[in-house]
Image (cartoon, rainbow, N blue to C red):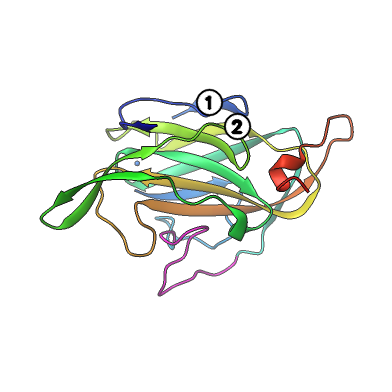
Amino acid sequence: MKLPVSLLIAGGALLMPVQASSHFNMFEPANMIVQNERGDPQKKGPCGGTTADPGTQSGIVTPVRGGQMLHIKIKETVYHPGHYRVAFARTPGELPADPEIETRQTEKGPQSVSAKIAKAGAPIIADGLFVHNQRPAPDFWETDIKVPNVDCENCTLQVIQFMAEHALNQDGGFSYHHCAALKITADPKLPLEKQWLGGL
């Protein structure tokens, strides 16, 4: 379904919202690319960089326990209306495509209107986060997501921002992208959730 950005849709059972403008910084978990004060480079999917600047790998891998909550903390540094999505995969190449976008034609080319909000379920942890159509008062937006209960030495958590009322950017369409590398140790007391690793 395509929803206007004025509606708040939260992403389901794996999400516990805490708080809810479009460049953005990702502070928690640590970004896999070194980012500047605006969060750049972040245009290119699936994990940031640009054609001209692929970015410098930070080398940071965040250790986490499967089945536990992981804190996500972001700061929007250049405002656009829109919302955020969180996804998870073994590698950046296995992350889902950016959401389907509805656009309108302008004198300067296509401009984004809305994006399809996905239901929570592998590989989407949560979608429709922090929906906003005006600049919010808090600088930081924060939430906790449940880490899939899997064993994974170097999996990828992706946070993207869909931007409404935005022209097409050649590197990233209508989304900006950040990723974190996670080392997940499964909790043996909980069932394994292999669907988050493609069923393997």
Q: How many C-alpha atoms fall within 10 Å of the one at disc 2: few (<14), some, or many (≥20)? A: some
Residue 18's disc number: 1
Give the SS element for disc 1: strand
| 115 sits to left or right of 13 | left
For the stretch drawn in magenta, the main secondary structure is loop
Disc 2 marks a residue whose amino acid type is: Asp
Whole-percent x, y for residue 131 in the image: 38, 32
Foreground: 113 or 187?
113
Residue behind mark 2: 144
Q: How many C-alpha atoms fall within 10 Å of the one at disc 1: few (<14), some, or many (≥20)? A: few
Whole-percent x, y for residue 121 in the image: 61, 34
Q: Earlier in the sequence, mark 1 or mark 2?
A: 1
Disc 1 marks a residue whose amino acid type is: Val
- The answer to whether the residues at label 1 and label 2 have Cβ atoms under 8 Å apart is yes
Identify the image quadrant of residue 153. bottom right
| 62 sits to left or right of 42 | right
Residue in the picture at 44% in, 63% down: 41
Give the SS element for disc 2: strand
Q: Is residue 174 above or below residue 55?
A: above
Q: Which residues are magenta?
A: 42-57
Identify the image quadrant of residue 107. bottom left
Whole-percent x, y for residue 33 in the image: 55, 62
Residue in the picture at 82% in, 40% down: 186
Q: Is residue 51 magenta?
A: yes
